[in-house]
Image (cartoon, coloured by chain):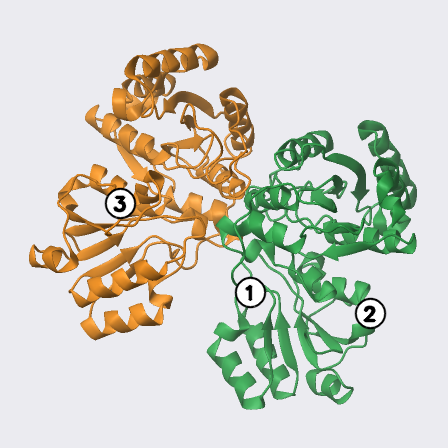
Chain colours: A green, B orange
Amino acid sequence: MIPHPYLLYLGEPKDELSVKTSRGVAEWRPELCIGEYRGPACTLTLGLPHLDFAEAAARGARTLILGVANAGGLLGAQTVADVVAALQAGLNVASGLHERLAAHPQIRAAAEAANLQLFDVREPPPHLPIGNGRPRPGRRLLTVGTDCSVGKMYTTLALERELRARGLKADFRATGQTGIFIAQSGVPIDAVVADFIAGAAEWISPARDDDGWDLIEGQGSLFHPSFAGVSHGLLHGAQPDALVLCHEPGRAHMRGLPGRSLPDLRTCLERNLEAARLTSPHVIAVGVALNTSRLASDEAQRTCRETEDLLGLPCQDPIAMGVGRIADRLQQCFVSSEAA
Amino acid sequence: MIPHPYLLYLGEPKDELSVKTSRGVAEWRPELCIGEYRGPACTLTLGLPHLDFAEAAARGARTLILGVANAGGLLGAQTVADVVAALQAGLNVASGLHERLAAHPQIRAAAEAANLQLFDVREPPPHLPIGNGRPRPGRRLLTVGTDCSVGKMYTTLALERELRARGLKADFRATGQTGIFIAQSGVPIDAVVADFIAGAAEWISPARDDDGWDLIEGQGSLFHPSFAGVSHGLLHGAQPDALVLCHEPGRAHMRGLPGRSLPDLRTCLERNLEAARLTSPHVIAVGVALNTSRLASDEAQRTCRETEDLLGLPCQDPIAMGVGRIADRLQQCFVSSEAA
């Protein structure tokens, strides 16, 4: 377990998506977060008190959460310097980047000198199984997306909150670094060895017989040419009974790939259902979650209505509108799960 | 480079598929192979002289090739003992298993004591890129399959041999341990971190402008619930102009998964073309390669004719019939490549 309270690191982010890990932890586990650390040129904020490392330590912070992301997942020179400074100020450090804290001689030396811990949450657990695709008991929902960073984790967490509020058993299953900081368990599915993707997904959502739901955080997109392999293996291993399709209307291009357009919603959903049937022949879609944060309110409402008409599924923005109607559809389609 | 001549290890295989790496090296690089090592209960042979480790060393063997496979890729206790004995007899050792030779204390100690080398060809190169899906020059062909171990590597190597015999430039690009032993380069694509599958495929088949073909060894199957993520990422990263579908008629179930049937050929091919179009919009299929080794000759011929009628593509068994007609179709469809 990572010691809390947390100081959330922003550094010098190049855009809002770069700090989605820190923001996600702040939004879904505010009780764990004591402040944020911003570099001199940082113009973003999570709305938490800005603290330097010494101030944070003085107020009781135990761990700096390196909640930043970039393509390739490397630690930059400034970030390395900040991590060393945080350790010298008395904070443990936890990171979700591909490049490991523990692999950096300067960082390792600083941690050893201060007798503090380094957490690399993107280090997968040892001895993951190979997936086998055999039917297993339990109810599972997976979020899938048109692209990376369209709201799959938020949607999954919103569904957990909603189903629990209705008295159902429901557990968020994390597959990415932010989700793991939030759930305090899970597997960083994009960091496992390729042969074990489906096996890792099976491992985080094992057979259950309590009529509860595993709500599995999706990753990437079948339509993202960098990461579709991850998404496909996760889809097979999750063996989902239900899918929720996530999308951000108006996004100009696939994440990180200017010029590459997003798939249309119907094609994306059909392709996901088609692939999912290999291990879950009766899988159905139960809703669409849109990230409408860049739209005016009336436009967001209209876009959701149009999407509902297009796909015949309830469509909501989990942040602006909740996920009540998607949860309604889920309960209608899986009546026995209400017996929990 | 791995020192040769090779001694090929069979050990105590549980079936023919378990020794496909050793057999592949023996068949495609006979000039590198001096003998085979069989355990006391081994009933299989590659047709090479049976040598123990001391005999092999006395005849000039330089490296024991651990050309065996099993689900999970672990070194068993007997294999560890054999590796240590081979090192003590003066042989280097090369392995394609997931579990690393260098991670085993006994093996590492024996190698250090004898001043010999350990080669883990399943260790991916460092600093692979993230895939980007951007169009790149060059001609690329990828073999895809209904299942694992249906002949994708053999088909790809047979096409290399055939195209070169026709005076075309053509290079086998290895994605698995056997292929890497044969090509002496490549990336073990199922061993890379999941985020880098497509990037690894882009890396092994970079842009080329000499009108030659990269012939890329496929892995797994979009229809294998353990490994489809690998196959999907490879398909995107390979950015193939042409696909050849590989299959073994009469196989009872998907490799390693009793009770799970194989996909039908048409569905399998269509799904591969559909997924490949994300990065290669004009991809076409140019042939079907069947492994008919378990069929009588007349039955093999009839099965190929029926498959041709079904799919409208040339269909051959690369071992029994060659790949001439598949190469003909490739040349017809890509006329400019004949200018080489």
Q: Which residue is mark 1?
A: A123
Q: Which badge, 1 or 2, is on the more N-terminal residue?
A: 2
Dot 1: what SS? loop
Residue at image x 41%, y 23%?
A: B249
* Chain assignment, label 3: B
| Residue B278 % position (x, y) | 56, 33
Check disc 1 and give the amino acid type. Glu
Q: Secondary structure at mark 2?
A: helix
Mark 3 = which residue? B22
Q: Find disc 2 in the rendering and name its residue.
A: A30
Q: Is residue B330 left or right of residue B195?
A: left
Residue A47 in sight here: no
- Circle 3 SS class: helix
Residue at left 60%, top 41%?
A134
Question: How far, Cα to Cα, is label 1 from label 2?
Answer: 25 Å
Q: How many numbered discs, if any?
A: 3
Q: Nearer the viewer, mark 1 or mark 2?
A: 1
